[in-house]
Image (cartoon, grey):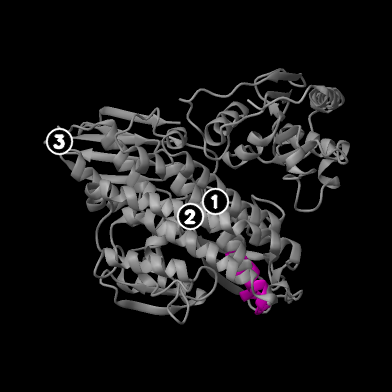
Amino acid sequence: MSQTITIDPVTRLEGHGKITIQLNGHGEVEDAQFHVTQVRGFERFSEGRPFYEMPGLMARICGICPVSHLITSAKACEAIMSVRIPHSAAQLRRMLNLAQMIQSHALSFFYLSSPDLLLGMEADPKVRNIFGVVGAKPNLGRAGIALRRFGQHIIELLGHKRIHPGWVVPGGVTEPLSAAKRDEILAMMPEAFQSTKLALAGYKQIVDNFRPEIEVFANFPSNYLGLVNEDDSIEFTDGALRLIDGTGRIIEDGITAARSTEIIGEAVEPHSYTKFTYYKPLGYPDGCYRVGPLARLNIAKSMGTPLADAELAEFKQLAAGPVHSSFYYHHARLIDILYGIEKIEQILNDPLILDTHVRATAGVNRLEGAGQSEAPRGTLHHHYKVDENGLITWANLVIATGHNNHAMNKGVAQAARHYIKNGKFTEGILNRVEAVVRTFDPCLSCSTHAFGQMPLAMTLLSADGEVVDHVVRS
Amino acid sequence: MFPGPQRRRPGAPCSVESSNANQIRCLILACGNTLREDDGVGPFLAHWAEERWRDDARVRVLCDHQWTPEMAEDVAQAETIVFIDCATDSAPGLVRCMAVKPAPDSTKLGMHHLDASQLLALSKHVYGAMPRTSLLLTIGAGSLELREGFSAVVQAALPEARQGLEDTVQRLLSSKTVQRA
């Protein structure tokens, strides 16, 4: 008699999801799926709106990465306007994007994942939370909060609000940076660096405790997609996409936002409202790929900042080619943070950052436009079509978590097959299956364009459809 | 008609600060969403408080959509604190001010929003300090629909809420300065 295990909800994720694990008659895992079960409709209700409203509208998809949507949407609008924004505006947006990345990664590492990493996967759920982390490692608890504040305060200084800031508009930004704000941000740098170094050191101390998990946490060759500059250094805001295969060979390079709309397909599976993106020339599912911190570090040859470059060199020693285990998303996230802080400091130390020319203006010059950037979780695309009056006639968003959907499903199945034997499982085992999803740090609210709140559940069903176990975490 | 959104700086309905953090005897920490009708009482009272104590360095006003772990340091540094929010578990329009204690250690924390007791507990655990007096001022919500402005019953309760906040803060400011808990 086969059984299905359902984890519902998956805890410590952004948004809500469900995992179903199907056992065969011998108690071995036959299949596992990661479901996302909401629909939000942003692409539909934006039809008929003026294109210049889109950044503000699209930012409301998410409270964690609204800046990514602001910037990517603005870039799609600028394609419609056929403008190139001033250099200072590009640098200011880059700074805002990096600040968001820092605070988002801090949330993921310290609040969502550190309970597992610092207290262990088998720790009592009652202590496997941020209180437990603070109790065991108070300095790390403070470091996590400090990094979140650092990123959020920069967003607030630039965009006037921590959540759903404005300021980014089609054509650039609404106001330049003042010297006072620049100096305020620079004054926060020492603590941000210290917090990040503490986190990296703490992670390196514990990572060897997770060798078994590293082997089975979505550890398989895959393609990888991410932005790079022409000098092969990492990029979050501009640049072009590069797609590599599991050996590191470049499949396609210099992928612009317009080209992305031609080559990225979206497959639909019946068990989830999140689509499965893939590289069309390779078909589905062979053309699936991973995005986000792990992909970015696998693709980039350098970070372009000294401390992060040293960390990248160490990271690349983990494997002869691309690093495949998704457990290392945690490590990559910390390197992303370090790079972000260094890059922000570089930008602020350039006198041109105070330039008052920060916005280009134009009307509708094309009836279609696309934009792309690196959100914390990976590549984000916005693609719009407008009429002659600039009203949206069609919009499509391709979210980072959608890019990772196939890998998350495959990773959940891999971990479930490894850990669940003879139909037996423990709280720690179920936590490990959830933890695989957490390595990707998915934002299910964004990727599903979801409305309302719905918990993620893990359910174990028999072949007869009988519920053997059901874990609901609301 | 709710005057708050029109009076605030564009793009900055919340997250206002009004004084030097080193001299804070009373932190007013509000939360709420001005687009969810009565959920906007927190920002409304925060804005009023910002104007009321603009020239008083002993009072600091903070306001955001929700209370988050990042506020724990601000809470830890305050001698006293008044949290402000709408309540969904009391009669519409009912104004209450009650003491709040830190949550037990076993409490699960929401990463996007905390309640007052959880924020106090986090301050205590992370920074080893929390205010000596912590109060929660609430107004019972009448409606949380997607719109600006307040329901009639909450609109009618706002003068009482303002007076309650005034009296509470004055009482806290006039109490003796002692070591934080």
Asked if the residue at tag 1 contacts the one at tag 2, i.e. Cβ–Cβ closer than 8 Å, the answer is yes
Q: What is the number of the mark on residue A147?
A: 1
Query: Left or right: where does residue A48 sit relative to residue A14?
Result: right
Secondary structure beneath dot 2 equals helix
Residue type for callout 2: Thr
| Residue A287 seen from this side | no
**Whether label 1 touches label 3, CB < 8 Å:** no
Q: Which mark is residue A196?
A: 2
Q: Earlier in the sequence, mark 2 or mark 3?
A: 3
Residue at the image point whose x is 55% and y is 33% from the top: B122
**Residue drawn at the location 35% of the way across and 43% of the way down:** A117
Instruction: Give the magenta-colored segment's residue range.
Output: A72-92
Whether the magenta-drawn stretch holds residue A3 is answered as no
**Labelled pair 2, 3 in contact (Cβ < 8 Å):** no
Tell me the residue at 76%/26% (across/down). B177
Q: Secondary structure at mark 1?
A: helix
